Image: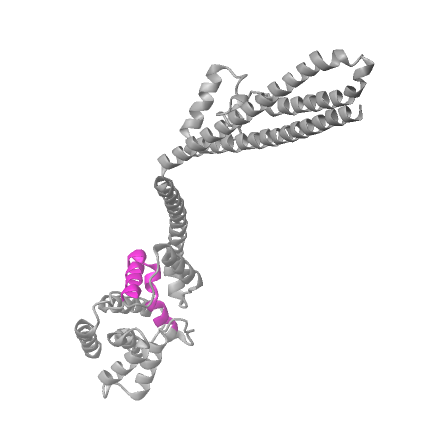
Amino acid sequence: MDLLKDIKEYVFSLLQDELPAHIIYHNFQHTLRVVKKLQELIKGEAVTEKEATLLQIAAWFHDSGFVKGAKNHEEIGVELAKKFLKDKITDDDFAVVSRLILATKIGHKPKDQLERIIKDADCSHLASKSFNQTSDLLKEELRLTGTADYSDLDWKRENVTFLTNHQFYTNYGIENWQEKKQSNLLDCFKSVKKLEKERKANKQKKKALKEKEKKAELPEKGIETMFRVTLRNHNKLSQIADTKANILLSVNAILISIALSSLVPRLDNPSNAHLIIPTIILVGFSVVSIIFAIQSTRPKVTEGQFTKEDVAQKKVNLLFFGNFHQMSLNEFKWGMKEVMKDKDYLYDSMIKDLYFLGLVLNKKYKLLRTTYTVFTMGIIISVASFFIAFIMR
């Protein structure tokens, strides 16, 4: 038919000359595909020759409005058709064409057979073998026009939603296209699962890389120096505490020796009875001081064993001798190699070693402080008692 041929040439020239370069999906190829699928539907559905002509006219113009942009392109297509078809078809026929063009809007529910046919023709790509390629073109067009910028996963999800909610309205479409559309839907489901798995793997990989970079940024030499200096200081403090305890042990031992050798033998003499209480006070405080000094230096013996489960769960600190002194050399070597394989485990062991050494130091210095207090009070009270004893005599 000459009219349809003229319309085809007009639409082709219009889209060729005026369609923006970023409209890569709603172009002449898309229009041509819709017209071909429409002709297939016309043969499969019962329509008159006149209805077939009006359907094809609407199909040629249905996306011509994209020359002015995506917004309200159906209405613009109606205006372009009206301008071209003036005096070529009757007003009643144009009213049908206009209604059919507007029926291609997304979300429009067809009201009659002609609208059902053009709706199915416009969405025929959902049941095509090239659905993925066509869909990717639409995705890119949306990005280029600034309408939406979907990730691959989000776009596949959109396709799943659209295909799930879409339906073919004609009997021909349902019988001949529904199965392929369902196949494309299944492919989209598979793509979504695959992309979700890849996204999860990428997130984990990025997280691991970020943690690795974060660890790489840590000043390892500075950390090792910190541990070395802190542990050395703790050991020095422990040695100082032991030295002070030994001094107190020696002093009190001397005091007791003097008391036992010089004072006690003379206490059986009635003339020295006044020295009994001061001597008891002196010896008593010295004994108590010695007990506290011994407690501050008394080592704590631990079990000295560990299991492979302890190492695997990072529960045991192999840097402290008390945790391995009863293990065999081979077991200890294995445990240390496991520690050296894992930097986090190694640092964790050093932190534990530092922490528990601090607890030991705290206990030492508390006992040492008590020892000095007892010793000081003992000296003061003993001297005072001797002084009072001599005065009372």
Viewer-proximal residue among 146 and 388:
388
The percent position of residue 130, horizontal first and vertical second, equals 29, 57
Residue 300 appears in the rendering: no
Q: Residue at x 42, y 30 (%)?
A: 228
Viewer-proximal residue among 17 and 96:
17
The residues colored magenta run 116-144
Q: Residue at x 67, y 27 (%)?
A: 379
58 displayed left or right of 353: left
The percent position of residue 331, horizontal first and vertical second, equals 48, 18
* Residue at far right of view: 270
Type of colouring:
one colour
Q: Residue at x 46, y 31 (%)?
A: 233
Question: Residue 128 lies in what quarter of the image?
Answer: bottom left
Image label count: 0
The quadrant of the image that shows the C terminus is top right
285 displayed left or right of 270: left
The quadrant of the image that shows the N terminus is bottom left
Does residue 372 lie above or below 121 as drawn?
above
Residue 238 appears in the rendering: yes
Q: Residue at x 62, y 29 (%)?
A: 372
Magenta segment, principal secondary structure?
Answer: helix
Asked if the magenta segment contains residue 134, the reply would be yes
Asked if the magenta segment contains residue 128, the reply would be yes
The percent position of residue 262, horizontal first and vertical second, equals 70, 13
Question: Residue 366 lies in what quarter of the image?
Answer: top right
Viewer-proximal residue among 341 and 221:
221
Does residue 213 lie above or below 251 as drawn?
below
Does residue 269 lie above or below 300 as drawn?
above
Does residue 331 lie above or below 362 as drawn?
above
The percent position of residue 148, horizontal first and vertical second, equals 34, 65
Question: Residue 155 lies in what quarter of the image?
Answer: bottom left
